[in-house]
Amino acid sequence: MTNYVDFPEADWKTLRTIKETLLRRASTRALERVEKIIASREADPHKSYLELWRVLRDEDKAIGRMFDDLRRSNARLKLAEMIRNKLLTPEEITAFTTDTRDRIIEMSGANQAL
């Protein structure tokens, strides 16, 4: 079993440095989805309301999986989730050590061509 506590200090510093940017990016994406729903309201206001509620719930869960309780012991899991959600840019991924980069790409199930 992989030991996630061995997350390198350099990678932890990198993650802490970009965390607020990533959280803003995730929040902006969520708000853009909300704005799109509001701008294109259905003829049935209740249908729009239900869609808005679903999007907010889904985005909240996704943001929680990526950022809630972020620690060195779960940092790779959180980073893999960020890759699955297309939150990290290729440049941000390359800022991590080769070992971390390889592990989070593998854990995310992402294409190696990132």
Image (cartoon, grey):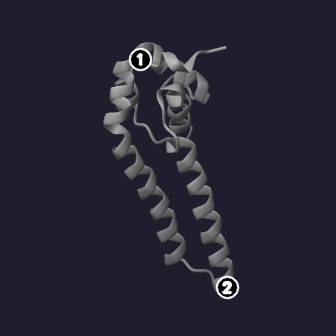
Q: Residue at x 60, y 70 (%)?
A: 52
| Three-letter code for the amino acid on which mark 1 is drawn | Pro
Total marks placed: 2
Q: Which mark is residue 88?
A: none
Q: With 26 as the anchor, is 1 left or right in this view?
A: right
Above-or-below relation of 43 to 48: below
**C-alpha distance separating marks 1 and 2:** 52 Å
Q: Residue at x 58, y 63 (%)?
A: 56
The residue tagged 2 is 44
Q: Residue at x 46, y 20 (%)?
A: 101
Query: Contact (CB < 8 A) between labels 1 and 2?
Result: no
Helix, strand or loop under label 1: loop
In front here: 68 or 54? Answer: 68
- Crowd rating for badge 1 (residues with CA inside 10 Å; few <14, some 14–19, many 20+): some
- Which mark is nearer the camera, 1 or 2? 1
Q: Which mark is residue 8?
A: 1
In front here: 7 or 91? Answer: 7
Q: With 63 as the anchor, is 46 left or right in this view?
A: right
x and y, in percent, of residue 87 in the image: 46, 42
Helix, strand or loop under label 2: loop
